[in-house]
Structure formats: structure tokens, C-alpha cells
Image (tube, coloured by chain):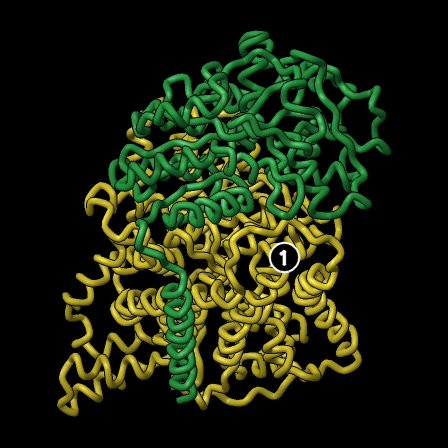
Chain colours: A green, B yellow
Amino acid sequence: MRWRAVLAAAIACGSLGAGVLAGCSSSGSNPSNGSITVYSGQHEQTTNGLAAAFEKQTGITVNVRNDDEGMLANLIALQGSHSPADVFYTENSPPLEFLQGKGLLSPVSSGTLSSATARYNSPGGDWVGVSARVSVLIYNPSLIAKSQLPAGVLQLADPKYKGKLALAAGETDFQPIVTSVLKTYGQAAALSWLAGIKSNAASHSVPDNETIANDVNRGQVAFGVINEYYWYRLKAEIGASAMHSQITYFAPRDPGYVIDVSGAAVLKSGKHQAAAQKFLAFLVSKQGQEIIARASGNEQSYEYPLGSGVTTSAPETPFSQLQPNAITIADLGGGSAAIALLQQAGLL
Amino acid sequence: MAAGTLADRREEREEKAACAPKRARRPVALLTIGSLVAAVLALPLVFLLIEAQGAGVSEVRHLIFRSLTRVLLWNTIRLTVVVTVACAVIGTAAAWCVERTDLPGRRTWAVLVVVPLAIPDFVVSFGWNSLWGWARGFTGAVIVMTLAVYPLVYLPVAASLRGADPGQEEVARSLGCGRVRTFIRITLGQAKGAIAGGCLLVALVLLAEYGAFEILGYQTFTTEIFTELNQYSFAASCALSLVLVVLSLLVLAGEGTLRGRGQVSRSGPMTQRVNPPQQLGWTRWPVLVLFTALALLALGVPIGAAAYWMADGLPAGLSGGSNVSLLNAAGHTAMYGGAAAALATVLAFPVALLAVRHRGRMRQLLERSTYLVLGMPGVVIAFALSYFTERYAAGFGYGTSMLLIACYAIMFFPLALVGVKASLARAPAGLDEVARSLGQRRLAVLFRVTVRLAGPGLVAAFCLVFLSVVTELTATLLLIPTGSQTLATQFWAYETNLSYSQAAPFALVMIIVAAVPSYVLGRFFNRPAQARG
């Protein structure tokens, strides 16, 4: 009858777990000023840094759910009017536009919108742009010389790069580039471009940008396209001495040279509208933006702040000196055209 | 787990049914409960069909019949076939060596070969991939998955070899069959059902695997379903999930065919003679080398990698992520795992009873249908539950651990079922009848006799589900109460950030938490027959 002892042990184990949790949760909550629930697709370090500072300033508790932004967008759409989320904070604008299209977002207060950069806010005023990133080429100089790199995004499809290119077609960061190419060159050209890229990256199709950065750095593949902050994050993680890769920009105004905007919205279904608006206002306030811009410490996001005139020293190139393509947030939209094209090309 | 012993028992039970006409009575209460459980387990499939219908048949057809599906089919099927065969070979060979030969250190090996089950697939792939860049794609996926899941074949085969009658081998030898022929014709024949049952689990687990393939950069239906979901292309992910369901059905049908209707009788229902172990002779040395290699690859690499990254304190790394302590995350993991395992085991009991004690085409179908969820990505099941609670319960329970625990119980129900069935099949139904004839009431018989006889199986079921919950990631991310973390979600948060040094301790604690139930499992399936019940 030894199994009884085992069963008892299992039950003891479960109750021990519950006990530990009870101990933890009772110490952590602060119900006095209410709480909000944030669904976040942003990097955990960034979100948690912001949430902690906001809690300290306002006394409002912030509960964060972290997952991929697309997954969370699906979840919010599925939960509809019963979603427990008050705020949705994303890495890219399309998931926000997707939810706006479903009528699930509340208008952002005008003060918050005006603290940020109008050009990178929701065209309909339903979410605010918090920070931005720029697409760059990451390459390993021991595998490919800088002069050999493509100057424009169209050349990524050039057969001479076969086997040299890493691609994360499933990443939400790649979608804006596809939209940009689609808008500049049209459907047919974009499709054959995707086919070329697919064939060039056939041997190195990866799930995410972190993997591209890591693999290029380790010399597994010559180059790829990422948002600049992945290179900086990798450097912070493994140390400057372990960096065997570099980043460089596309040619000015090239369709591949795009700005990706990380934004936040208040959910219409949320039960803490005022506190949620406060959180958004905090994100683009001087204090919030300085957390994003922080160039030292471990919470640095390596993104460009978009509000309250705050600037950053890493990345080195100032935001104002970037020369991106003229594509707008409205052009990027919910990304459905890009997704359909990626599916047609067999990349999704 | 021991689908083989189950098959063996079925034959016996058929004989018994002839002399016990009372058993033919329709078990109404049991059927009702069983049908309810099956209905709950069918929810994810219903959800997929609703969503597919919402997207429109032509759209779904368009999404299914495109070139990508061909690539995914090829990737998924070749991986499933190769890994399943590899697991069958390794699992069966290891089980035979441990159970039927004089291999030195058999009792130690019996535990060591099972413990890899405690290591999450994505930790194994992390181990290989973070140490060696070449371990990726198809090659990486085959190596990693084989090493991670072969115990699912080992466990039932070992149990079935132990339970099978050695007399047949003796007879075969005495009739002039050589060692090899005896092994192929008798031993493999005896274990056929168990091998098929183990392969079924392996194949279904492979179909639904996500984390490992994501790390290894290998594209299957499940990874693609995630990609589509990340692009909030819900219709496309539902379409792909439906293809996955069809693949699972094929696997189930395949297992049914493989298992066949082998004639495995024995000298007496509960008699099990101690086997005279086969002398390995000089071959024991190469066999020992192989066992050592297996342990090193399956246990040494992932544990070594985690220890290496932990000791490699070089880079400070990006910290400031969730400041959730190891203890807190382990507490959540243990609590969710314990609750879900208990729930799944309780749900599995009536279905197993129905399948083992009351044969019939419909009842078997009902039982088999519950295996489908194992081949579905956890995230699909999580979305399905979110959908039904939102639609029919006004979001009740969302964001509480209740929904998460229910989700786990549904996801891993088949594993619990396998455990309960294995041990119910070993418990002679006759004892119930004896108790009844002694004037015990039906319910009392259930608790005082049947549940007791099935005790070890219930523990095994509990352990299997617990293990799986510890390593579950994707459904957890969607359904976990906001702000909470488990060991798996915290490991993943660090791993995806390439913060290996911070991910490593979570991997190690996960292995430690899961090692206890896998040790218990190893012991359960290796118990000498005399101690059973």
C-alpha cells in the first residue's frame, strides 16, 4: 500500500505550494488605490520597469499578463466585453489597429495624445505611440563584407544571397516591411520579392528576431533584418566582447527602412477606465519616457522614446536623424494585406 | 500506459464475460458520466468547427489547400514517423534489457531511463541548441524529441514484459527457436500492444509539441498554428488545427491496426512466475555502454547545459524581468500541477472503468475519442475554453486558476486515462463480484474494492499529468491568473530574451519538481507483480 504514502506526499506537496502562494500574495497587494490589468506584448523588462514606477507614483496596482502581442490580441477579441484587460500595450501598431477595427478600444485622452508624437499615434486617436524602433540589417563581418550587403530591401531577394539570409517571417516586426514593399511596388512585385526572399532564407528560416540576432552573431548565417534594439539587447545580455556582428541602415527612404511603433490603448470593456487612462498618460510622461530611454542599468529597452521630448543615447543615431520611408501608421493598418500576401507566398 | 496488458486483459475479460452474464447489464450511471466527460473533451474540436464555419468554408478550404500545408505535412509526418520509430526501438530495447536480461544495475537503470520524462522538451532543446549550433532543424528535432519522449514507450513495454508469461519463451526455445527468433516472434508479440500504445502517445505528443520546435527552428503544424495566431490570423490557425485533428485521427487508427488482436494468454490470470533472466554474456559490455550513452544524452546534456549557463555568470544579462522568485514560481507550478492531476485522474476513472469493464463498440469509441485532445496544441484548448466561458458563462472564471486547472485536466486527460486503465485492467473484476455477493452495496464496492485495486494506477495517472503540467507553457501563458508565473513561463520569458543564465535555475528546479513523480512512475511500472494491488 505504498501508493497511499505517495498520494499523501502529493497532497502535502500541493498544499505546501498553496501555502507558499498564500504567503506571497498577501504581502504583495495594495488595494487602497485600486488596480489595473495590463496585457503586454512588450518586453517584460520594459513593462515591469514602467509598471513599478507607475505603482510607486500613483499607488495603483498594475497586474501584467505577458505573452506575444498577436496571441493577446486574439484573446481580447475572443473575450469581447468580458475581457479583464484594462490596457493593451504592444510592440507594434497593427495589433492595436486590429482591435480598433473591431471597435474594442476607448479614445485616448487628448492630453496624453499631445504629449506623444502625433505622426506615430493612432490615426483615430484610439491608442498612443509610446516608443519606436527602426529596421536595420544585422550582419557578421567575418561572413559578409559591409559593402556586399543589400542597399535596398528589394535586393534581399537577389539570388546571390541564397543561403546567407536569415528570416523570421512569422514575427510581427516583419509585417510592416511587407506592407511598405507592397505599397511602394505593388502586389505582383511584392509577391515575387517574397518568393525570392523565401528561397534565399530557405536554410535559415527562424521563429523570431532574437534568434536572427543570436545566429548572425554566432556566425550561423551571414545577415538578416531586425529591429535595432535586438542587437543592443543581445549586447547587453552577452557582453560587448562576445559581439561578432554589426548593424547598418538601409539606404535613406528605402521601403525597408521603416519605423515600428510600440503603443498602448485602453480597452472599452475595462472596468477601470480612469486608472487606465492614467497609466497611458504615465507611459508618455517625462518620467515614463525616461525609463524607456534609460541608457544604463538592466531595464533599458533600446527603443526611441516618442513623448515629452525625451531622447536616448543608445541607439547612438538620434531619432531625428533617421531617414525612414514615408509609410504612415494608417498605411500599416491592421496588417491584414501583408498577412494575406505572406500566406499567399507560403511564408505564413 | 500499459495498453498491451490492457489488450491481454481484454481477451481474458471476454472469456469471463461468458460465465458472468450479470456484467452485461447496461451501466447507466457510468455511461452518463463517461459521455459527459467525453463531451467536455470534445469542446476544443467543437470550437474549431465553430470558428472554421465563421470564417467560411471556402476561406478554410483556401487556407488548407495551399503550398505551405504540403511543406508542413511533410515536416510533421516525417518527424513523427522517424521519432516514433526511434522511440519504439529505444524504448523496447531498453525495456527488454531491464526486464528480461541479467544487465548489471537493472534496478538503477529502471529509474534512470524514466527520469528524462521529467525534463521539459523545450529544456532539452534549449540544452542542445544553446551548446551546439548544429542541433537544429530536422536533425535537432529528431534527436531532442527522441531523447525527451522515449520513456512513453519504455514505461508500458516494461510493464507488459513484466506481466507477460515467460513460459511462452521457454516453450519456443524448447521447440528449437533461436534467441533472435524467440525474441521477434514471442517477446515482441507479447509487447506488441504496449509498443503500439506507447507509440500512440509519442506520436500525439509530437503533433502538439511547440516549445522545442520553436527553439530548434523546425516548422510543423503546431508551430505554424502559433505563427498564425501571433499574426491574429485566427481562421488560418483553425484551418491548420483541423488538419492536425485529421492527423491525430490517422495516428489513432494506425495504433488500432498495429495493436491488432494478438493472442496473449497465460497459465493463470494472476500468476506471474519470476523470469529466469537471459544471460547477456560478453554483450553486457556494449549494452552497458549504450545505456550510459542514453543516460548521458537524455539527462546529462540538458542538466549539464543548465548548470553550465548558471555557472557561466559572465554577463550580467538583462534583468528587471518579473521579480518572481524561484520558490513562488515553484509553488504555483506544484499547486496547479497537483490540482489538475487530481481532477484529470478523477475524470479518467469512470471512462477507464467503462473501457475496461464494459466492452462495446460505442463505449470503446467514446473512450478513444478522448485521445484527440492530446494531439491538439495547448493554446487551441485554452482559446476554446476562453470562448465557451465568454459565450455561455459571461466570462465566469476567467483569470482565475480554476479555468487554467480545468484546461490542464482536459489537455492531459488521455495520460491519466492510460494510467488508470493500465491498473484497472490488472485488477480482476471478479473481486468486485465477490464483494457484491457478500452483501456490499454498489457504491461501497466502488470505493472499497475497485478504487483500492486501481490505487497504484491512480497514482501513476496523477504523476503523468503532474509531470506534463509542470512543463506546459502555451496554455499557461493565456490562462494563468494575471501576474502569476510558473517555472515554465518564467523559464520561457528568460530563454526568449536569450538570458540563459537567468533561465537556467528555473530549468533546474523544473527538473527537480518533475523528477519526483517520474521516479514514482518508474517504480510503479517496475513493481514486482506480487506487490500489486
Residue B194 at x, y percent in the picture:
49, 67
Residue at screen point 29% across, 50% down: B398
Depicted B355 relative to depicted B394: above or below: below
Q: Splitting the image into 4 quarters, where does residue A162 fall?
A: top right
Q: Is residue B348 left or right of residue A248?
A: left
- The chain containing the residue under callout 1 comes to B
Residue B308 at x, y percent in the picture:
73, 62
Q: Quadrant of the C terminus of chain B?
A: bottom left
The residue tagged 1 is B502
Can residue B518 be seen? yes
Closer to the camera in the image, B124 or A279 = A279
Residue at screen point 21% across, 57% down: B36
* Residue density around tag 1, few if under 14, some if 14–19, many if 20 or more, within 10 Å: many
Residue at screen point 33% across, 46% down: B44
Depicted A2 relative to depicted B229: above or below: below
Closer to the camera in the image, A225 or A346 = A225
Residue A132 at x, y percent in the picture:
56, 27
Q: Is residue A158 left or right of residue B338?
A: right
